[in-house]
Amino acid sequence: MDWDAIRREYTEDADSIDKAFKIHTAVMERVRRLQIPPADTLLSPRGVISALPYDLLAGVLGEVWAELMGGEPGVDLEKALRVFAADEPFPEEGHDALEELPMFLRAAVTGYLTLLREKSHVPQEAGTGAGTCPFCGTHPRMAFDSETSRELACLLCKKQWRFQRIGCPFCGNDNHETLGYFDVEGFEGVRVQYCSECKHYLKVFDTRKRAVRDAETEDVLSLGLDAAAEEEGYL
Ligand SMILES: [Zn+2]
Ligand SMILES: [Zn+2]
């Protein structure tokens, strides 16, 4: 994660970014100390998500919360972690009031999953052509194009894998008449691919036109495209 690039892009949000940086650093420091067994015995995609040690991660978050925020978050952290990892909407009560909670959850889930994937030696070619992450089963939100190929990127475990240039990873649609792109002013070398069949979108980064950083950083730097896509009614 290139925090300096994010600070330069969102100068007016310096306080929030600083907070996110501190949370991320403190959570990662503790997650790295956990015993992380390789996941090769682990199940199918989505199985990885359901087999995460949520109780351990909740314990980690409770400690970091007390250290950085003081006291307790007042929500069931284990339940919140499960909801976050499954990409389900948060139940209303309690969660909305806490601006910092998603920062904690994201740091713990992505930190653990990334270390788990690195330990599990997923073959480079694993998942070629798949519409969901071959390691954790999550739907990708981003793609990186080079001269000859496209790679999808998972934001939870940071796996990248090859995918067809014309295609929707959500529904498998490969009809160029119902797939399209639009640009957003102020964003260079990245555009939104949308699918009229299933209404999902993907942010596509052109590595020939943009000095692309890691997926996590690029995701944050291109939040304006998510806003534009959602405004157009895409999911
Ligand atoms: Zn993944
Ligand atoms: Zn689709």
Image (spheres, rainbow, N blue to C red):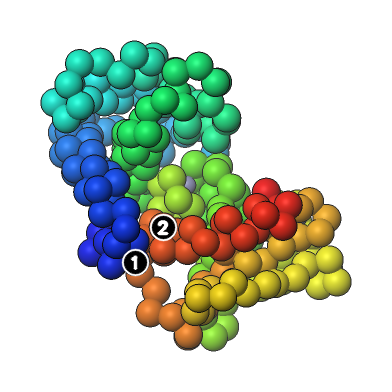
Callout in the foreground (1, 2): 1
Res 117 seen here:
yes
**Residue that carries the numbered disc 1 in the rendered image:** 9
As displayed, is residue 91 above or below residue 9?
A: above
Q: CA distance from mark 1 to mark 2?
A: 9 Å
Res 2 seen here:
no
Quarter assignment of residue 201: bottom right
Secondary-structure class at tag 1:
helix
Number of labels in the image equals 2
Image quadrant holding the N terminus, namely bottom left
Q: Nearer the viewer, residue 137 or 211?
A: 211
**Residue that carries the numbered disc 2 in the rendered image:** 220
Quarter assignment of residue 219: bottom left
Secondary-structure class at tag 2:
helix
Q: Nearer the viewer, residue 29 or 123?
A: 29
Q: Position of residue 43 (x, y in %)?
A: 51, 32
Q: Position of residue 139 (x, y in %)?
A: 59, 47
Q: Is residue 108 left or right of residue 179?
A: left
Q: Mark 1 touching mark 2, by CB under 8 A?
A: yes
